[in-house]
Image (cartoon, rainbow, N blue to C red):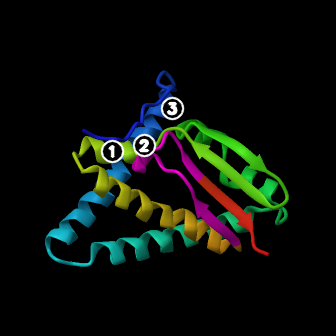
Amino acid sequence: MSKIKNTPKITDDVLVNEVRAAIEHRATWMSLILDAADKENVDFEAIGRAAISATGCFHGKNIKEKLADDSMQEFQKTFLHDLGQKLFEMQIKTCDDEKLEVEFNYCALVSAWQKQGFSDERIELLCDMAMDGDRGIAEANNLEFKLGKTIAKGDDVCEVNFYKKK
């Protein structure tokens, strides 16, 4: 039996449901491509991490170009738009001059991987690989990234944290 708990609380918002379905679609093809590579004895993890990191750096650069200043508050406002916060049922725990700490209470990517029947261990790996996108966003914005708890590991939340580099 799976240890993963990933049940959305927001279920009656049409736009949220439609965008979550699109995110699940993206997570489905990502994992199926990587799974096919794995079955062909290709180093799917190295390929996946490189591609996902490059995607994060690309999006991070776009975020950086939109920032009015280099404050964490401006990064939070630009990176975590209102719809995104609803999609992942985020709670901003801290946003000050030094850090942005966010808890995600639901993950559409994990939902997609569960529907595909992947093991908890595979979902945990796919989740960490997907976080390479956030790591790339941090890198492009000269921030440190720290992943704490994750839904994919069976925790109640994902802790996604960005810190100013010292």
Q: Position of residue 105 (x, y in %)?
A: 53, 38
Amino acid residing under circle 3: Leu
Q: Which mark is residue 160?
A: none
Q: Position of residue 21 (x, y in %)?
A: 39, 39
Quadrant in the picture for residue 68: bottom right
Could you tell me if the residues under marks 3 and 2 are in contact, i.e. CB atoms within 8 Å? no
Viewer-side label of 3, 2: 2
Residue of label 2: 108
**First along the sequence among labels 3 and 2:** 3
Could you tell me if the residues under marks 2 and 1 are in contact, i.e. CB atoms within 8 Å? yes
Local secondary structure at mark 1: helix
Q: Which residues are magenta?
A: 143-159
Task: Using the image as rendered, state which of residue 98 and residue 42 is in the foreground.
Answer: 98
Reply yes or no: does residue 113 show up in magenta.
no
Could you tell me if the residues under marks 1 and 3 are in contact, i.e. CB atoms within 8 Å? no
Q: CA distance from mark 2 to mark 1?
A: 6 Å
Q: CA distance from mark 1 to mark 3?
A: 18 Å
Task: Using the image as rendered, state which of residue 15 and residue 92 is in the foreground.
Answer: 92
Name the residue: 37% across, 53% down: 26
**First along the sequence among labels 1 and 3:** 3
Vertical order, 147 against 37 (above or below): above
Name the residue: 83% across, 53% down: 96
Local secondary structure at mark 2: helix
Q: Which mark is residue 15?
A: 3
Q: Residues within 10 Å of mark 1 (few under 14, many from 20)?
A: many
Amino acid residing under circle 2: Ala
Quick one: quadrant of the N terminus? top left
Q: CA distance from mark 3 to mark 2?
A: 14 Å
Tell me if 113 is positioned left or right of 156 in this view: left
Vertical order, 65 against 93 (above or below): below
Name the residue: 81% across, 53% down: 73
Q: Which mark is residue 112?
A: 1
